[in-house]
């Protein structure tokens, strides 16, 4: 009888151990808890910034200067508020000299996460838990994976996207369908 108990307990123990390892492995993959201690800082330059031409010298100096090239124009901006994770910084919607559009995150500071994206949305920005899940309810454009959880970053809008149709930006965690933080875009 003792032999039977031992024989039965080994497979049960092995199965339990295998299941435990699988559950722990899946949990680590899904939650990626080590990202809470990893920061990724990105420091991208303002897109479309054009240096002013040097002042002419010699005979050309008497010629009136040509109009200076213009840099990016801010169409809308806003401050990030915290949702699921503490988030701060600002957002600007820019029109570049070539007519394209970019969302710029400045002084971003948020937690790192397993599957973070930058979304341009038509959803209202709500404070607290009420704002955690609203951004996938309406129309949104996924501008790509968040490049880093700190710093200054640029995200190009696809050419067929009309930026006037969108009113907010969210740092969205696709894995858990939750906003880490968001900003309402006030038109300038």
Image: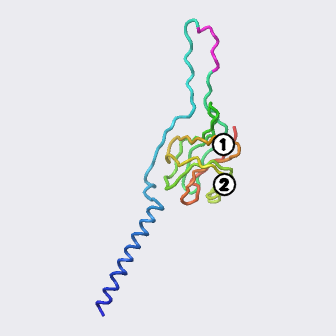
Reading the chain from its start, which is encountered first: label 2 or label 1? 2
Q: Position of residue 80 (x, y in %)?
A: 60, 47
Residue at the extreme bottom: 1
Residue at the extreme front: 160
Residue 150 lies left or right of residue 161; in this view the side is: left
Residue at the extreme top: 59
Q: Nearer the viewer, mark 2 or mark 1?
A: 1
Queried whether the magenta region covers residue 62, the answer comes back as yes
Label 1: few (<14), some (14–19) or many (≥20) C-alpha neighbours in 10 Å: few
Residue 188 lies left or right of residue 1; in this view the side is: right
Towards the viewer: 12 or 61 = 12
Which picture quadrant has residue 126? bottom right
Numbered range of the magenta stretch: 60-67
As helix, strand or loop, the secondary structure at mark 1 comes to loop
As helix, strand or loop, the secondary structure at mark 2 comes to loop
Q: Position of residue 9 (x, y in %)?
A: 34, 84
Residue positioned 62% across, 31% down in the render: 98
Q: Main secondary structure of the magenta part?
A: loop
Q: Which residue is mark 2?
A: 126
Q: Is residue 61 above or below residue 38?
A: above
Q: Position of residue 95 (x, y in %)?
A: 64, 35
Q: Which residue is mark 1?
A: 160
Residue positioned 59% across, 43% down in the render: 90
Looking at the rendered image, the quarter that the C terminus falls into is top right
Towards the viewer: 149 or 60 = 60
Q: Position of residue 16 (x, y in %)?
A: 39, 77
Residue positioned 46% across, 47% down in the render: 40
Residue positioned 60% across, 29% down in the render: 71
Residue 81 lies left or right of residue 115; in this view the side is: right
Residue 62 lies left or right of residue 39; in this view the side is: right
């Amino acid at each position: 009888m003792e032999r039977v108990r031992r024989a039965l307990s080994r497979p049960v123990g092995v199965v339990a151990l295998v299941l435990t390892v699988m559950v722990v492995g899946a949990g680590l993959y899904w939650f990626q808890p080590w990202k809470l201690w990893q920061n990724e800082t990105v420091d991208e330059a303002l897109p479309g910034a054009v240096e002013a031409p040097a002042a002419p010298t010699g005979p050309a100096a008497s010629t009136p200067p040509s109009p200076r090239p213009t840099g990016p124009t801010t169409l809308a901006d806003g401050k990030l508020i915290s949702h699921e994770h503490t988030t701060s910084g600002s957002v600007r919607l820019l029109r570049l000299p070539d007519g394209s559009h970019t969302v710029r995150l400045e002084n971003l500071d948020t937690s790192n996460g397993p599957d973070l994206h930058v979304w341009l949305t038509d959803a209202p920005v709500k404070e607290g838990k009420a704002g955690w899940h609203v951004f996938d309810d309406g129309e949104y454009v996924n501008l790509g994976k968040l490049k880093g959880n700190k710093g200054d970053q640029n995200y190009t809008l696809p050419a067929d996207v009309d930026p006037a149709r969108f009113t907010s930006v969210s740092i969205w965690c696709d894995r858990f369908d939750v906003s880490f933080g968001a900003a309402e875009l006030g038109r300038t």
